[in-house]
Amino acid sequence: MESINKERFDELIKGDKPVVCDFFANWCTPCKMLAPVLEEASTKYGDAVFVKVDVDENAELAARYGIMSIPLVAVFKNGEQTAKSLGYMSKSEADKFLNENL
């Protein structure tokens, strides 16, 4: 999964594919636990673009979406946030969330 900045984020969410964005921070233990779950999911859901945004380095994006807690996984379609999940997700929880929202 590519770690991106605000400019790349804004470019991707306007594209044709759904975007699954993991808002995280390097110091966040649940974020570190979630990373391999999403990495594996990114190989299963090829119709979506999976990315990571470090909220410490991209505070403007975190503020734009009102992110107060992490990890937060958000799905974007046609430039709009259509779903989000806060906190760690197991593999089965991530599959359920992605199946329902992609």
Image (tube, rainbow, N blue to C red):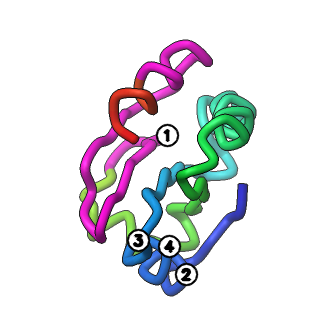
Vertical order, 18 against 33 (above or below): below
Dot 4 falls on a residue whose secondary structure is loop
The residue under label 3 is: 13
Spot occupied by residue 2 in the image (x, y as percentages of width and height): 71, 63
The residue under label 4 is: 58
First in residue order: circle 1 vs circle 2: 2
Dot 2 falls on a residue whose secondary structure is helix
Asked if residue 23 shows in the view, the reply is no
Instruction: Identify the amino acid type marked 2.
Output: Arg
Q: Along the line of sight, which residue is nearer the eye, 49 or 65?
A: 49
Spot occupied by residue 61 in the image (x, y as percentages of width and height): 39, 71
Instruction: Identify the amino acid type marked 1.
Output: Pro
First in residue order: circle 4 vs circle 2: 2
At x 39%, y 48%, the residue is 74
The residue under label 2 is: 8
Asked if residue 32 shows in the view, the reply is yes
At x 49%, y 16%, the residue is 93
Spot occupied by residue 85 in the image (x, y as percentages of width and height): 36, 34
At x 43%, y 42%, the residue is 72
Q: Residues within 10 Å of mark 3 (few under 14, many from 20)?
A: many
Q: Which residues are magenta?
A: 68-96
At x 27%, y 61%, the residue is 65
First in residue order: circle 3 vs circle 1: 3
Instruction: Identify the amino acid type marked 4.
Output: Asn
First in residue order: circle 3 vs circle 2: 2
Does residue 92 appear left or right of residue 101 in this picture?
right
